Image (cartoon, rainbow, N blue to C red):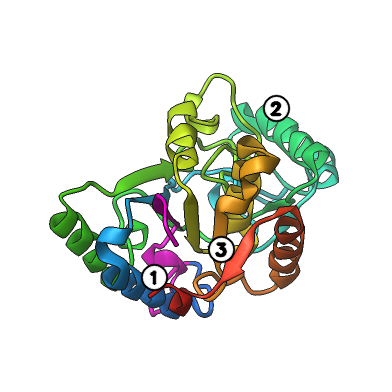
């Protein structure tokens, strides 16, 4: 295929790999990222730009257990779903009383948007920690590409705002108008739009891949959605959320996104 080729790799970090020590392992993620690494090594100079998003959190985060507690002061276990009613009735409340009003407003805004419920995840991708780092084989492939092509990999951090989930690399689930990092970056969107073909891979299909591609498709518009090509064997869903991944694939392919496998690019 001719034209400008970009590769967008979403959250290819240790904490999402199915390896010992990972905080939030996604079955199949390590193999997914191995195929992405092989793709980079195989295509080499045919790739014009590579973008890598990095899920980036602090321990105290609205989607981590330490933010919340019940009436007895106990934190919710990982994978607890917190509803608007839970916060309104005190089933779960912000451990810091000063954060309670914003927490209630957040779950209400999240429910109104209707895309995801608030899920309490294990602490993951903590800034500066092992889990935040890119999976080693892929990291080596990225470095090799950069050195051979004399180009920089474009790393994009997301998730630093403690008071909103940030599945999408484009914008937070509930954007904060006072924090530009939770809003779309017009310069990055324009850079992605330069691609004639934008290959997409990463973790997890059900959440960060789905949210990023949905938001990007909305911003690119119908005429450009066809440039989005998801590498279907390079993204896997979080266990228990497979239906979200399937719905994303159905919705976006209906809008014009293409599906292919990494081996098709040689």
The x and y percentages for residue 170 are 54, 40
Q: Nearer the viewer, residue 54 or 75?
A: 54
Question: Of all residues shown, which one is farthest toward the top?
Answer: 178
Q: Is residue 16 magenta?
A: yes
Element under disc 3: strand
Marks 3/2: CA–CA distance? 39 Å
Report which quarter residue 204 is drawn in: bottom right
Magenta residues span 1-23
Q: Nearer the viewer, residue 209 or 82?
A: 209
Q: Is residue 98 magenta?
A: no
Residue labelled with disc 2? 101
Element under disc 1: helix
Residue drawn 65% across the image and 57% down it: 257
- N-terminal-most mark, 1 or 2: 1
Secondary structure predominantly adopted by residues drawn in magenta: loop
Residue drawn 66% across the image and 38% down it: 221
Residue labelled with disc 3? 230
- N-terminal-most mark, 3 or 1: 1
Residue labelled with disc 1? 36
Instruction: Identify the image quadrant of the C terminus.
Output: bottom left
Vertical position of residue 230 compared to residue 55: above or below: below
Q: Nearer the viewer, residue 219 or 181?
A: 219
Q: Please rate how many residues cluster around mark 3, counting C-alpha atoms within 10 Å: few if below 14, some from 14 to 19, many from 20.
A: many
Q: Nearer the viewer, mark 1 or mark 2?
A: 1
The x and y percentages for residue 242 are 70, 72
């Amino acid at each position: 295929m001719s034209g400008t080729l970009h590769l967008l790799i979403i959250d290819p970090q240790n904490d999402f790999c199915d390896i010992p020590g990972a905080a939030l392992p996604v079955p199949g993620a390590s193999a997914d990222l191995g195929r992405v690494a092989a793709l980079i090594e195989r295509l080499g100079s045919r790739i014009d730009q590579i973008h890598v998003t990095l899920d980036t959190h602090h321990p105290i985060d609205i989607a981590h257990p330490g933010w919340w507690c019940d009436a007895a002061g106990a934190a919710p276990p990982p994978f607890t779903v917190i509803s608007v009613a839970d916060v309104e009735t005190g089933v779960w409340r912000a451990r810091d009383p000063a954060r309670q009003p914003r927490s209630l407003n957040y779950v209400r805004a999240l429910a109104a948007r209707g895309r995801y419920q608030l899920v309490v995840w294990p602490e993951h991708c903590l800034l500066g920690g092992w889990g935040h780092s890119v999976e080693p084989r892929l990291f080596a492939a990225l470095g090799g590409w950069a050195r051979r092509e004399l180009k920089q990999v474009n790393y994009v951090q997301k998730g630093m705002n403690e008071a909103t989930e940030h599945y999408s690399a484009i914008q937070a689930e509930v954007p904060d108008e006072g924090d530009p990092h939770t809003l779309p970056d017009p310069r990055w969107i324009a850079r992605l739009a330069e691609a004639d073909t934008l290959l997409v891979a990463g973790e997890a299909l059900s959440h960060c891949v789905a949210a990023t591609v949905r938001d990007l498709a909305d911003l690119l518009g119908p005429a450009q959605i066809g440039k989005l090509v998801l590498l279907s064997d390079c993204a896997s869903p979080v266990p228990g959320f497979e239906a979200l991944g399937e719905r994303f694939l159905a919705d976006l392919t209906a809008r014009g996104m293409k599906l292919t496998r990494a081996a098709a690019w040689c």
